[in-house]
Amino acid sequence: MDYFIELLFSGLTRGSIYALIALGYTMVYGIIGLINFAHGEIYMIGAFTAFIVATVLSIYGFPLLAIIVIAGVAAAVWSSAYGYTIEKIAYKPLRHAPRLSPLISAIGMSIFLQNYVLLAQTSDFLPFPELIPDFEFMEPVAHIVGSSDLVILITTTVVMLILTYIIKFTRVGKAMRATAQDRTMAMLVGINVNQIISATFIIGSALAAIGGLLIASHIGQINFYIGFIAGIKAFTAAVLGGIGSIPGAVLGSLVLGLTESFATGYVSSDYEDVFAFSLLVLILIFKPSGLLGKAETKKV
Amino acid sequence: MDNQILKVNGLTMDFGGIRALNSLDLDVNRGEIVALIGPNGAGKTTFFNCITGIYAPTEGEVYLASPGSDTKVSLKGLKPNQVTEKGLARTFQNIRLFAKMTVLENVMIGRHCRTKATVLGAVFRNRTTRDEEQSILETSYDILEKVGLEQYVNEFANNLPYGAQRRLEVARALATEPLLLLLDEPAAGMNPQETIELEKLIKEISSEGQSILLIEHDMTLVMSLSDRIFVMDYGKKIAEGTPVEIRENPAVIKAYLGEDVDA
């Protein structure tokens, strides 16, 4: 039973990290219909930013909590700057081009960013400082649920609640939903659509950066390639849940995380990806729009 | 004082070899209801698309009065959202509501360009943001009451009856505080009862000083509402005048009914 609970929690942890990244995919898709393949790289850059800031701060002997907060904010801001710039450079000029063009541009951006970090940081795995200490009160259950699992679960839940609030109730959130539904009409009611698209990229990037910080400190090492794998997984999760749907991205991520965790635990860790992608194939065969996605109807 | 709210000079729009609008002049005075009529394909909706910034006109100028000053601003080259900010709001021939949002949200969206809360403001809930949200809510409720949709506030827009959806479009446009309200066939597809209610609504809005430019095919509605009428055919203005003048204008009769074969 303990083993089951351990796998359950590790699955939820994994899933909530995927969710932080998947949200960026799904929000961008919802608003401009583009799969932003550079999104995984945003997450990787977030992890690197957090790494650099945290390392520097720990040399100067900052308290752990301050390091986490400052590194988190720095990662979110820096990644957002990247997300914003990528949209302006690689996607905005192609807004009215055929759908394939921005997609190719996104893949190019992804390869560029990987190689750029590879040049700057080498291909070695860098040891990420352990930011989340083992809490004393977690000791009795520490063999099942780690302290960092707990922190990740709480952080992602809070972040998702804030996001839900923003999307549902704020002025910017309403404008985002309006833009996603009908861009021309949104402009006609006075919404600056370019600003809203930028805001979407910024929010999505900040979420990915927080994910980067959390996972890096959980796993303990990073390199330039982590964005690719995480990006593919989160993309899978977003499609699984129904791309374009925000609750779908969260649900898809949790399902994917749990599947991987149980497959690793009960079958073999070699088959982790096999199970993840088989799940994707199955869902796409039986419910192509994803778990919560709506089938697209086109008016003729 | 200059009484014009909209002034259009020589507006021309070419689509490839087709001249959809041919050097069109039009003006609307403060507080007026002006109708734009013409047979199908005359270019009426194209005209709306040109002045709201959806299309960039080939030639011509569009000027809109600016509040608190005597000079007019040119709308040339502005994007649709900027045009809306300057004070033009419109509805569509085929309804374009945000279907997956509630009635209230649809109207609140219209307040977007008149407010400025940011994401950070929303997360930290500072004073300005809270006050602004309060005022958006109040204005939106007022507008919904005015158009008679207050019983639907929390319904999804696409669950509304047809006539109510049309009125919601008007409400959303009004929420942007337009200087001039553009209505593109507001009575299209309505039953007689709904049309009568719409007429009442337009009269009521107009009595509060709202200037209105409308495209409409329902001639009873046009004749009873309009102060002046512009008639278009093949992208050209063929007549303008009061409802009485238009009714008797031979060019208009010809455009609508065709020429008498024997004559």
Image (spheres, coloured by chain):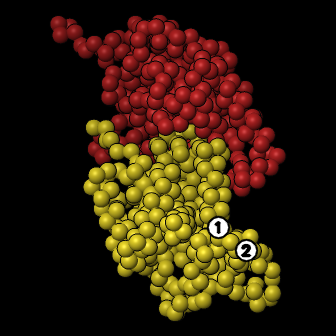
Chain colours: A yellow, B red
Badge 1: how crowded within 10 Å, few (<14), some, or many (20+)?
some
Q: Residue placed at 17% from the left, 7% from the top?
A: B262
Same subunit: marks 1 and 2: yes
Residue B44 percent location from the top left of the image: 41, 29
B100 shown above or below A35:
above
Residue A27 percent location from the top left of the image: 50, 56
Quadrant of the rendered structure where residue B179 is? top right
**Chain on which label 1 sits:** A
Three-letter code for the amino acid on which mark 2 is drawn: Phe
Horizontal arrangement in the rendering, residue B141 relative to residue A86 (left or right): right
* CB within 8 Å, label 1 to label 2: yes
Residue designated by label 2: A135
Secondary structure state at the residue bearing disc 2: loop
Horizontal arrangement in the rendering, residue A25 relative to residue B209 (left or right): left
Residue A60 percent location from the top left of the image: 80, 88
Residue B46 percent location from the top left of the image: 41, 35
User: Which sits earlier in the primary sequence, circle 1 or circle 2?
Assistant: 2
Q: Residue placed at 70% from the left, 43% from the top?
A: B115
Horizontal arrangement in the rendering, residue A33 relative to residue B157 (left or right): left
Q: Is residue A93 visible?
A: no
Q: Residue placed at 24% from the left, 13% from the top?
A: B259
Three-letter code for the amino acid on which mark 1 is drawn: Leu
Q: Is residue A298 visible?
A: yes
B36 shown above or below B115:
above
Q: Residue furthest front?
A: A1
Instruction: Calculate the distance from the C-alpha at mark 1 to the C-alpha at mark 2.
Output: 10 Å
Quadrant of image for the C terminus of chain A: top left
Residue toward you, B14 or A38: A38
B224 shown above or below A21:
above
